[in-house]
Each structure stands twice: as C-alpha cells, then as structure tokens.
Amino acid sequence: MQKTIGYAAHNQNSPLVPFNFERRDLTATDVQIEILYCGVCHSDIHQVRNEWGNSVFPMVPGHEIVGKVSQVGSKVTAFKIGDAVGVGCMVNSCRVCPDCQDHLEQFCNAAEFTYNWPDKHLGGSHYGGYSTQIVVDQDFVLYVSDKLELAAVAPLLCAGITTYSPLRHWKVGRGDKVGIVGLGGLGHMGLKFAHALGAHVVLFTTNPAKIEDGKRLGADEVVLSNHSDQMQQHLAGFDFILDTVSAPHSLDAYTALLKRDGTLCLVGLPDHPHPSPSVGNLIFKRRRIVGSLIGGIQETQEMLDFCAENSITSDIEIIPIQQINEAFERVLKSDVKYRFVIDLASLKS
Ligand code: NAP
Ligand code: ZN
Ligand code: ZN
C-alpha cells in the first residue's frame, strides 16, 4: 500500500480538507501515475454537495487527471516510466458485455467511475485526482501528446470527451448549424470542437459579458438566451443543439429552434429535473431530445489525438489546491475562464 495525500469532503456540507489515504500496490496490469494536474468539473461540485443523491464520504473528487507514469506492473506493455498520460471519469469496466465490446465502457453495468464509486480492490470508495498519485489499470490510461501544454490537457479528459463524443455520434460537420448552450467548462470545449468540425456554431449564453469570448472560442454568432427576440430569430434553424447547462431550465426554448428531425442533446446533469418539455414541439417536426455520457476509452484517445493534431486545449486558470473551496464558489458564480485546473505540486511541497 502506498501512502497518498489528497483533499477530501467528509460530508455534503463541509469544505474540502487535506486527507491521508492509501493507494493499492500495483497488480501486473496496473500503472501508477504521479498526478501533475487535475481539472475541476462541475460534476465534482454536484457530488461533493450530494446533489445527485449518491454521494459516499469521505470523497476525494477529480476525474480530469494528467501526470507522468511513475511505476508499471509486470505485464504493462503500453506505458513506461516517465510517459505523459491521462485518466478520465472511468478506471475499469467488465470488458466482455456488449457495451464494452462496442468500446462504450461508460455504459457498462460494471463500469467503475474514478471516484465516489465502490473500489473492488480495496473496498470502500475509489478516490479521485485531487491527490498526489493514482493507480489505474493500463486499459483505462490515455496517451497524452507532449505537443500540448499538460495543464490545459487535463479538462479534455471530461469536458473534452463529453462534448466531442455527441458531436461525433450525431455526425456534426460542415453544412450543419449547431448550437452550444452555456459557456462553462463543457461549453467552451463544445465551441472549439464544433468549430473545428466545420459547423456553423451559435453560442447560447445568459451572460452578455461572455459574447466576445464566445466568438474567440469558435462561435460564429452569440445569442443571449434570456432575450426572446434574439431566440425567435433562430426558430426551426438548427440541426443539432448541445445543452451543457448545470441548472434546471426550459427545454422548449431550444426544441423550438430545431429543424425537422433536429436533435437537442443534453449533457448537463442538474440537481433537479428540467420542467417537462412540450410534446407538441417534438411531434410537429419529429424533433428529438437525447442524452450523452462522457465517451468510451477508444474515443477519448481519438479526441486527445484530434486535439494534438488541431492544437486544441482547454482555456484554464491554474490554482493551488489550497484554493479549491473558493474555486468551487467561483464555478457556481460562472466566474472562471473556463476551467480551473489544480497544480498538484501545491500538495507535495
Ligand atoms: P460550468 O463550468 O459551471 O458551466 C455551466 C454553464 O451553464 C455556465 O457557465 C452557464 O453558462 C450555464 N448556467 C449555469 N447556471 C445556469 C442557469 N441557472 N440558467 C442558465 N444557464 C446556466 O459546468 P461544467 O463543468 O461545464 O458542467 C456542466 C454540466 O454538465 C454539469 O451539470 C455537469 O455535472 C455536467 N456534466 C455532464 C457530463 C456527461 O457525461 N453528461 C460530463 C461532465 C459534466 P452561461 O453563463 O453561458 O449562461
Ligand atoms: Zn466531469
Ligand atoms: Zn462491460
């Protein structure tokens, strides 16, 4: 067992505080990673505050992990000490079910998520990336290009794949008019990917102060979603809309903007349900509302390679871990451009 330090929440009302725990000794197929950076996802806040009702404490959050391989098990062939690597939202799955066979491990009934999830090796819960090191089976470790700034790669492991995967699955590309709703961690990656895939991209934001950044990040147009006159101008105009908003809101405003057979894809997962959507909006133009969950390991690697080829990373603000509780408050106020990333050197010194 290997002594590790992280930051943990001990209940849903307490701040994150330093926490000592142990990582397992490596099995033959395990990779040990010295964590250098970890992104701060809104899902970390939802879970620390038990907003999804499934939280187990103590909880060490963090599923946007990048670092360097520090040790490998005897049967690890894919990685060697010193390699730059990443770990996202999953650390294991069954490998044999239809979802795993289709490289969609996120839907496997036995998928193990990176934290706040039962740890089959040690009992208790998995502990995430707000910590100095992690031990993960080699099949759930991703290669990271040394062409990209490592800290700015961290958010690709969740915010990146969560926006890349639905854009690819619903075949967004040149000639499509695509909406991205919400300019936060996920939304700013959605803008970059939709733009890189050649779509005409429209950002929907509630905040006029984000208009210029929206354009810089890839939007061809920016619509203030709380101005109904601006929304009306886009009625029945979109092929695909990706909704990243972390709070409950009316979906009708967006289904009305879809063309016939258009798709509204929800990736934001608020603490309370959205108001029930209008059925009329759906049936009259055969529109659909769908959801999407992160992406499989193979597709996550494809996304990281796409980012390396197209020089895409996240726009980040680096913080020491001692500022994590303040960072959570700032995310809730949408006061971050556009992802906090923890520099884990702050926990080692
Ligand atoms: P974030 O950085 O906080 O961004 C959320 C954005 O939503 C905000 O920037 C804001 O955009 C908008 N927003 C927030 N409150 C709003 C409100 N009351 N009304 C309208 N718009 C509001 O969060 P994130 O890290 O991108 O995560 C977004 C959501 O996705 C969270 O619920 C998270 O748990 C979920 N998530 C899902 C998956 C998945 O696999 N499906 C993966 C990761 C995260 P504007 O200021 O531009 O309006
Ligand atoms: Zn996340
Ligand atoms: Zn499976």
Image (cartoon, helix red, strand yellow):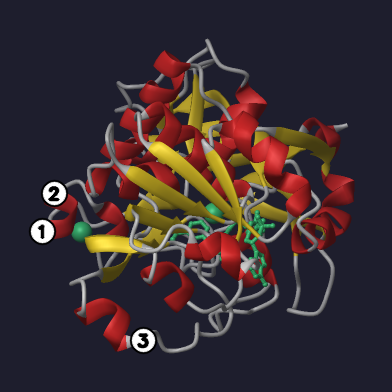
From the top left corner, tell me how far across and down residue 179 is, in percent. Answer: 44, 51
- How busy is the neighbourhood of tag 1: few (under 14 within 10 Å), some, or many (20 plus)? few
In the rendered image, the vertical position of residue 87 relative to residue 62, given as above or below:
above
Whether the residue under disc 1 has CB within 8 Å of ligand 3: yes
Which residue is found at the position 29% from the left and 28% from the top? 75
State the CA–CA distance, disc 3 to disc 1.
34 Å
Asked if the residue at label 2 sits under 8 Å from ligand 3, the reply is: no
Say whether residue 55 is left or right of residue 15: left
User: Mark 2 Cα within 10 Å, few/some/many (few <14, many 20+)?
Assistant: few
Label 3 or label 2, whichever comes before in sequence order: 2
Q: Which mark is residue 278?
A: 3
Task: Assign a secondary structure to mark 1.
Answer: helix
Q: CA distance from mark 2 to mark 1?
A: 6 Å
Quadrant holding the C terminus = top right
- Element carrying mark 2: loop
Mark 1 sits on what residue?
98
Element carrying mark 3: loop
Regarding ligand 3, which quadrant of the image does it lie in?
A: bottom left
Q: Is residue 25 visible?
A: no
Q: Are the residues flagged by discs 3 and 2 in contact, CB closer than 8 Å?
A: no
x 50%, y 33%: residue = 192
> Compared with residue 308, is residue 113 higher up or lower down, i.e. above or below?
below
Residue at mark 2: 102
Q: Along the line of sight, which residue is nearer the eye, 145 or 246? A: 246
Type of amino acid at the residue the image marks with label 2? Asp
